[in-house]
Image (tube, rainbow, N blue to C red):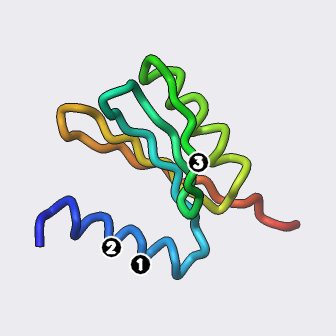
């Protein structure tokens, strides 16, 4: 099992246990896309900055959630967004 596949399956298991939904930002041949886990639709952007901005906004709207940015050099950044604690 490759490292990328193993990391994805580990993330899915943790996300499922906490109810976390993941927002993926990654490049493909047509630019950068943003996708919310469980949805088929993609939003496309010409640069990574616009895509990350959209991904953060989407993650904030679907808390508890996480944002994964997959750069073209193979690096990944991950951020988690939690719901506000009730007083």
Q: CA distance from mark 3 to mark 2?
A: 24 Å
* Secondary structure at numbered mark 3: loop
Please tell me how crowded label 1 is: few (under 14), some (14-19), or many (20+) other residues with Cα within 10 Å: few
Question: Which residue occupies 42% across, 29% down?
Answer: 32
Q: Position of residue 81 (x, y in %)?
A: 60, 53
Q: Is residue 49 left or right of residue 71?
A: right
Q: Which residue is mark 1?
A: 13
Q: Quadrant of residue 2?
A: bottom left
Residue 70 x/y as whole percent: 32, 41
Q: Residue furthest right?
A: 87
Name, please, the residue furthest toward the left.
Answer: 1
- Residue 21 coordinates in the image, percent (x, y): 57, 63
Q: Answer with left or right where residue 14 lies relative to residue 4.
A: right
Up the image or down, 49 lies above or below 41; here it is above
Would you name the residue on which mark 3 appears? Answer: 41
Query: Front-most of 27 and 71?
Result: 27
Question: Image point 53% across, 59% down: which residue?
Answer: 37
Q: Are marks 1 and 2 in contact (CB under 8 Å)?
A: yes
Q: Quadrant of residue 40?
A: bottom right
Q: Is residue 19 above or below residue 35?
A: below
Q: Residue at x 50, y 23 (%)?
A: 45
Compared across the picture, whether 18 is left or right of 57 comes to: left
Kindly report which numbered mark, 3 or 1, lies closer to the viewer in this rendering. Answer: 3
Q: How crowded is the residue under tag 2: few (<14 C-alpha within 10 Å), some, or many (20+)?
A: few
Q: Which residue is mark 2?
A: 10
Give the structural element (helix, strand or loop) at label 2: helix
In x, y percent, where is residue 5? Answer: 22, 65
Query: CB under 8 Å between callouts 3 and 1?
Result: no
Tell me which label, 3 or 1, sits earlier in the chain: 1
Query: How dense is the environment of label 3, judged by Cα within 10 Å: few (below 14), some, or many (20 and up)?
Result: few
């Amino acid at each position: 099992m490759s490292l990328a596949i193993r990391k994805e399956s580990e993330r899915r298991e943790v996300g499922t246990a906490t109810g976390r939904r993941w927002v993926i930002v990654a490049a493909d041949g047509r630019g950068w896309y943003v996708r919310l886990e469980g949805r088929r639709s993609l939003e496309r952007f010409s640069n990574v900055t616009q895509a990350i901005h959209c991904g953060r906004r989407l993650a904030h709207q679907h808390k508890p959630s996480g944002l994964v940015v997959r750069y073209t050099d193979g690096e990944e950044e991950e951020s988690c967004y939690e719901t506000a604690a009730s007083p």
